[in-house]
Amino acid sequence: MAANTLVLNELKASKVRRNPRGVFEKHLGSGEWWICYWDAQGRKRREKAGTKSNAIDLYRKRKNEALQGKKLPEKLRRAIVSFKEIADDAIADIKRRYRRPADDVARLKVLMSWFGSREAASITASEIETKLYSGAAQNEWSPATINHYRTIMSLAYRLARRNRKVEANPVRDVPHQREGNARTRALAAEEENALRAAIRQRYPVHELELDFALQTGLRQGSQYQLTWEMVDWDARVLHIQRTKNEEPIHLPLNDAALTVLLKLKACSKGKKRVFISEETGEPLNCPKHWFTDAVRLAGIQDFRWHDLRHTFATRLRKRGVALEDIADLLGHKTLAMTKRYAHISMERLHAAVRQLAVTPTDTTSDTEQFQSTQPHAAAAG
């Protein structure tokens, strides 16, 4: 019996190997034959053909039609591509190309929970917009977060178009949300005292992370991805080759920041990364597990980790540091983002406009002063 089964399997395998290109039996032994080909418009199609001989003839016919550029009816059966399939392709691409893929992979998984089993080509822009607004309402997403989801979904469709799995990208018709990038929430002195008290009470090992953020203004991702090889002790500079803007920055370190690094170095246990867990010895990737709770314990409202970066910039500006220098320290490509801090230190501008209020010592009128400076004024009179 086993020998007969083996022979039958070998015959089936041989039968499969003899199949012409583009011709296949949907279920082995079913007698139901299909063809798979690319039409003149570059779209992948599948058609049920019946017998194997019919499938071979139909495949040849479709190939000739494609070569002749003949447009086929839309009703012909095409391979169904689910949103999950194009999302999986996008996840693979993100993991291959992105330095920190976790956030975008998580967003794609949320999108898969919404649309996973749906045919990708059947999803409309209005459906996507409705889902995004619903998700924003339930999770209190900011406009920036909505745009992140929109962007990553659009990436999935762009890759699918490139791979000829879909014809159009419906996300292009979903409106981009206007983001309020003018936020400058800074930590007041009394708030900092309350926050430090909360950290020392419950999370004392993490206070150095707060210190470093306030002294460097680094983005959360850049801070927690720091390695010791980025620290130039002699020059007192951090050399970060890639930031959020894909640009390198060279950040000078003050005494307070160097003190933090020295303390961390003493506890580094030979690890490559600067910030590691004292409990597990593994690298820390974010402060979420302690910072949110510490802010709550301190009774501080509307404050997040990124606001430590705003605090860094705000305190520099209040001490008279030029916007151009703050932009360099923050790693901004242009001054457009840094100008949000322009209003914080107005002393120089106040001094400028005060010049207009100075009472002239000369009683000559402004008109007479002007006329007296013009060539040939006397002769003309």
Image: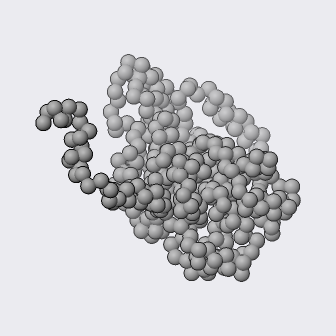
Q: Nearer the viewer, residue 253 or 144?
A: 253
Instruction: Name the residue located 67 percent from the left edge and 45 percent from the top edge.
Output: 250
Q: Nearer the viewer, residue 374 or 199?
A: 374
Q: Nearer the viewer, residue 89 or 187?
A: 187
Q: Is residue 12 above or below residue 305?
A: above
The colouring scheme, among rainbow, by chain, secondary structure or one colour, is one colour
Instruction: Name the residue located 77 percent from the left edge and 61 percent from the top edge.
Output: 259
Q: Is residue 146 visible?
A: no
* Place of residue 198 in the rendered image (x, y in percent of width and height, measured from the top left): 66, 79
Q: From the viewer's perspective, tell me whether residue 148 is left or right of residue 96.
A: left
Instruction: Name the residue located 81 percent from the left edge and 59 percent from the top edge.
Output: 262
Label total for image: 0
Quadrant of the rendering where the C terminus is positioned: top left
Quadrant of the rendering where the N terminus is positioned: top right
Q: From the viewer's perspective, tell me whether residue 340 is left or right of residue 191.
A: left
* Place of residue 215 in the rendered image (x, y in percent of width and height, measured from the top left): 66, 61
* Place of residue 183 in the rendered image (x, y in percent of width and height, measured from the top left): 46, 62
Q: Residue furthest left?
A: 381
Instruction: Name the residue located 44 percent from the left edge and 22 percent from the top edge.
Output: 63
Q: Is residue 164 visible?
A: yes
* Place of residue 78 in the rendered image (x, y in percent of width and height, measured from the top left): 43, 39
